[in-house]
Image: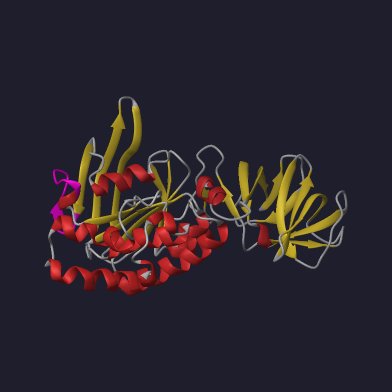
Amino acid sequence: MARILLKNITKRWGDFVAVDRQSLDIKDREFLVLLGPSGCGKTTTMRMIAGLEEPTAGEVWIGDRMVNDDLPKDRDVAMVFQNYGLYPHMSVFNNIAYPLKIRKSVPRSRIPELVNEAAERVELVPFLHRRPRELSGGQRQRVALARAIVREPQAFLMDEPLSNLDAKLRVTMRAELKHLSHELQITTVYVTHDQIEAMTLADRIGVMNEGKIRQLGTPDEIYNDPANIFVADFIGSPSMNLISGRVEGHQFVTVDRHELTRTAMGAMSQAVLGVRAEDIHVVAAGSGDVDGQVYAAENTGENVVLTLQLGGQRITCKEDRYIRFSIGETVGLKFDSNKNYLFDPSTGDRVRSPGN
């Protein structure tokens, strides 16, 4: 178990900068998720921690050692890959035992005991005699996890380990990972583009874009207190509504002159209002802050997701699953003035009221 510290690390290939002067302090036993779209630098950051990529500049520390010059095998971290990385000709037992055999870190007589302990943690004991091709995707993923666990490393590095699984199995494996994290208490860096995985697994989330962490915080902080338009738009399903307009006399007014909600801010000639779908409520036409027309209504089972046309912009909101709406129907929209966000469209940064 160890703290991982990145000091101004940069990774560059020619003129392309994959990671740009990024610093990050990952606490001992913390489960940190690097979240972002493809190409944002999250996997490159993890590979520099693992030693699979060499930083162009900066320092990587694991525990009390700077490991820039250490080979991957000498960094005492275990990596779980997206494609499992299992040896097809070996049994499950031998796949799990392989790191112990090549590192010679424990007496050979103890290997069966340690393999069985790791297999028991991920419920694989009945399958130890099988080959990977005889297992389901979820079972193969658990073999990869057991192979990482058996080493008892200082840190786990997980690169989108659930992305090859179907939706139902991902939910099951998320629960297993959450339980293992609680049980093992080993520093973990987890890379994903899936915001649900990040929100449900992380102690803290680093939301990355264009080689930099745009916001670092707990899931609650990332969701309820976004620092900029990128984070506000990336986190949430459906995405946060981002509505262009201005602030006139503490009233947010859209570009086509619809008055939506009160704000704590004074006049702003240009602003973007951010409001989550669950913070807009549908009421009878004429009785809300503004009227809109139903553009689409999607019944997800747990709720109805409405897309509403408001002048030249569309707004998404969530309503009770039993309510039905017709396309083209006019409805009223009521905004929760305590749950909206203002952003500067020129910088993308959050505009905070005094005291916030």
Query: x, y percentage for residue 21?
Result: 29, 40
The quadrant in which residue 204 appears is: bottom left
The image shows residue 31, relative to residue 73, as above or below, that is below
For residue 321, side relative to residue 10 (left or right): right
Magenta span covers which residues?
62-72
Query: From this viewpoint, is residue 221 visible?
Result: no
Q: Closer to the camera, 184 or 214?
A: 184
Residue 328 on the magenta span: no
* Quadrant in the rendering for residue 22: top left
- Nearest the camera: 207 or 134? 134
Residue 56 percent location from the top left of the image? 23, 35
Q: Is residue 249 left or right of residue 185?
A: right
Q: Residue at x 72, y 64 (%)?
A: 301
Colouring convention used in this rendered image of the protein: secondary structure
Is 4 placed left or right of 256 in the picture? left
From this viewpoint, which residue is outermost toward the top?
A: 15
Secondary structure character of the magenta stretch overall? loop
Up the image or down, 225 lies above or below 107; here it is above
Q: Residue at x 28, y 38 (%)?
A: 10
Residue depicted at 17% across the width and 59% down the height: 101
Above or below for 211 versus 178: above
x, y percentage for residue 113? 22, 73
The spot of residue 137 in percent (x, y) is: 47, 57
Quarter holding the N terminus is: bottom left
The number of callouts visible is: 0
Which is nearer the eye, 271 or 189? 189
- For the question of whether residue 110 can be seen, the reply is yes
Residue beneath the point at 46% across and 55% down: 162
